Image (tube, rainbow, N blue to C red):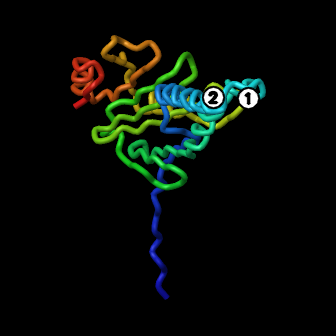
Amino acid sequence: MTVPKETTKIQEKRKEFSFYASPLSIIHILGLLVFSYLIDYIINSFLGTSHRYFRYESAIPYIICGLIIVCLLRKKRVEIVDNHTINFYTRGKLKYTNTIDNLLYIRCAGQGKITSSIVFVFSDKRIRLCMPLVMFSQYFKLYELEKLSGYLRTQFKLKQREHRTIFGVSKYVFTYWNPEKDENYKIYSESKGRHVC
């Protein structure tokens, strides 16, 4: 009788963050609101200004904008395996995978402790995770965005550096750079945030 060989399976160390996110940034939402006001203006010009319609007129742009935001919300998951590989999932399907070595920086936008978006910038791709309902975080516990950005900063010792734009240094956008990507940061600073390679 032969005894089967014992196979030792190496346990992978995984850290997961699940939340709802949208591809819309604050600029997209403002543009969407302007577009909604144009639709409201067109509807108003066709229907005329009756007293009954006037009561609901101002709510239409916000309803249109809110419906589009809700329709674009997707369940996202960011998975960090063995402190080396980052996997991005949308609705349970793997959409993108890369390693920490290829991460140039993460860009966090927000005010105070509230972060409304994170952009992961790799050498070959940018991944944007925006949270349009972050202002209602006390009512909807939908996001783990703060935990995700905090984990990445501490675990991989990302350095906080100034976020440069063509208008100067931003007060509400923060970049956290991979410490091994100093050459890329020089290019980023000289091009005022337009290029990293």
Q: Residue at x 39, y 49 (%)?
A: 97
Work out whether 192 lies above or below 98: above
Q: Identify the element where label 1 is drawn.
A: helix
Q: What residue type is labelled 2?
A: Asn
Residue 188: quadrant of the picture: top left
Disc 2: which residue: 44
Disc 1: which residue: 53
Q: Residue at x 58, y 37 (%)?
A: 69
Instruction: Let me know if residue 12 appears in the view.
Output: yes
Q: In terms of depth relative to the viewer, which is nearer, 18 or 64?
A: 64
Q: Residues within 10 Å of mark 1 (few under 14, many from 20)?
A: few
Residue 148, image x, y percentages: 52, 34
Residue 53, image x, y percentages: 73, 29
Q: What residue type is labelled 1?
A: Tyr
Q: Which residue is drawn at 45% across and 68% down?
A: 7
Q: How far apart are marks 1 and 2 (CA)?
A: 9 Å
Residue 52, image x, y percentages: 78, 28
Work out whether 163 lies above or below 116: above
Query: Do the numbered discs 1 and 2 sit on residues whose CB atoms are within 8 Å?
Result: yes
User: Left of 64 or right of it: where is 55?
Assistant: right
Please, which residue is most extreme toward the bottom here? 1
